Image (spheres, grey):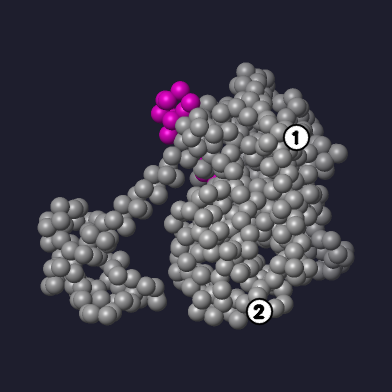
Amino acid sequence: MSHWSRYQTHLIRHEDLGISLDVSRMHFDDAFPEKMAGECARAMADMKALEAGGLANPDEGRMVGHYWLRAAHLAPTAELKAGIEKDLAEVKAFAAGVHDGRIAPPGGGKFTRLLVIGIGGSALGPQLVTEALVEADAPVKTHFFDNTDPDGMKRQLGVIGTDLKHTLTVVISKSGETAETRNGMLEAEAAYTAAGLNFAKHAAAVTGPDSLLDRHAAAQGWLHRFPMTDWVGGRTSVMSVVGLVPAAIQGVDLDQFLAGAADVDAKTRLLPVRENISMMMALMWHAAGNGRGEKDLVVLPYKDRLLLMSKYLQQLLMESLGKELDLDGKTVHQGIAVYGNKGSTDQHAYVQQLRDGVNNFFVTFIEVREAAKVPMLEVEPGVTAGDYLQGFLRGTRKALFESGRQSMTLSIPQVDAYYLGALIAVYERAVGFYASLVNINAYHQPGVQAGKKAAGAFLTLLAQVRDALTKAGAEQTADDLATAAGLEAEDVYHALTHLAANDARTTRTAGVNPAADRFVRKYRAGLRHLAGGNGGA
């Protein structure tokens, strides 16, 4: 079959939506979808059960309902439907109040900047929306605390500068106990206080009802508290209050954002496999990686506005699909590694390896057909920069195929609220379908919880080491302290080097090797200072 014939055979095109998926450059047998008919039928049934309110996350005892957020009538109870509609109305009303000045800083004027504090999906979703949709003339300029890096937070505060008095802060945490978000909130609160401002009159919370953050915000009299539900996970929360609150404040058209996702859901809910974009995408992932994730997924959006798409999909896929056990309790170590950049930046970065190096990947090009919404400059006679962008996409696709590299191309007409919602929905449903194809639970994340526990263990160790070093009063090696406290020497050494780098009272004298390094911590009455300006014991 010629390339042209294969393209026409394996192109899924929805003219009514303006979306298409070309899988003709993937190396799959033409009969593969039929061979997977049983698995696909099960995946469709699993999705139907999930959308009907089935217990999709049994180990956490909860439903998974992010699809209801853009089609409230599908919610399994009238109470859930009413809650979704109420939340959306509250978000719109709050944003309108910010825009017209009814919700304003106590010093006068309007809120002109927005600081979003969150981690994982509570930051990635809002960041993607901001990068893709928010224009230079948006009602507010937006900043993020998305890590517990004190230097990163100080830099963002430095950019905000004296505009802090006109900055609205939105803190996003379901439990209110997520360490990174709590730390960011405390850093922000300290900055407002240092500027002589009342943080509570500049703050809104997006959190679970009666969570630690919810109670704190209520007690302090924050501007508003938006309720997060336990049936929406972080990586699929961008169409919940998590993503809608920042988006609405920035002037994004929420109705169009939700409509794009709802329309894709409707298509992929009913269509047969060969016409179903999300199911075919999931089948391509399965075919490329032999159902074992044996090849990485490289995401290359040829549009600056979609720069963060690969980062967003990295969490969506890897947190959902990276599982040790399948639904039968068998050890399977499933997952698909995701990375990416943007075209044509990738031409000057890693396309060299993609074409000539190890063949351990497949590519998804994301094509945006409209290069610009305004007339374009001719950079050469009859040629625009947008023509070059399309040329690089087509050229890279061809060059990779000639070298035996697989790719598919997902195309949309333009980047706006509707089509960003549609893109997100395509991938969310593909993730759900793929998880069923390989018999895993896409909606829990035991590895994330293990990481949080490990971080907590280090903080406990750090306190033990700091106390032991203080009591020793003289230079100690890691072995000295480990033996005395019954701890692992390497763990103690890492705690000591952290203290030496960040605690003004702790010093390190280098030895010939780590075991010979010596540490001492001097106690000085009244000194409560850690390097970097944070308070400490």
Quadrant where the N terminus is found in the figure = top right
Front position in the image: 332 or 528? 528
**Magenta-drawn stretch contains 333:** yes
Left/right of residue 178 with respect to residue 388 in the rendered view: left
**Magenta-drawn stretch contains 116:** no
Front position in the image: 415 or 303? 415
Residue under circle 2? 107
Left/right of residue 433 with respect to residue 360 in the rendered view: right
Q: Up-down: is 93 above or below 164?
A: above
Please report the bounds of the magenta region as a residue range: 324-340
Q: Where is residue 158 in the image (x, y as percent from the top left)?
A: 55, 77
Residue at image coords 43%, 34%: 324
Mark 2: amino acid: Gly
Where on the picture, by quarter, is residue 423? top right
Residue at image coords 39%, 44%: 450
Please say whether residue 313 is visible from this viewpoint.
no
Residue at image coords 71%, 54%: 91
Residue under circle 1? 73
Quadrant where the C terminus is found in the figure = bottom left
Residue at image coords 21%, 76%: 523
Question: What secondary structure do most residues of the magenta stretch adopt?
Answer: loop
Front position in the image: 414 or 126? 126
Please say whether residue 216 is visible from this viewpoint.
yes
Label 1 secondary element: helix
Label 1: few (<14), some (14–19) or many (≥20) C-alpha neighbours in 10 Å: some
Q: Up-down: is 414 above or below 509?
A: above
Q: Where is residue 487 in the image (x, y as percent from the top left)?
A: 18, 53
**Residue 403 numbered tag:** none
Label 2 secondary element: loop
| Distance in Å between CA atoms under marks 1 and 2 | 43 Å
Q: Across the whole image, how many numbered discs are drawn on residues? A: 2
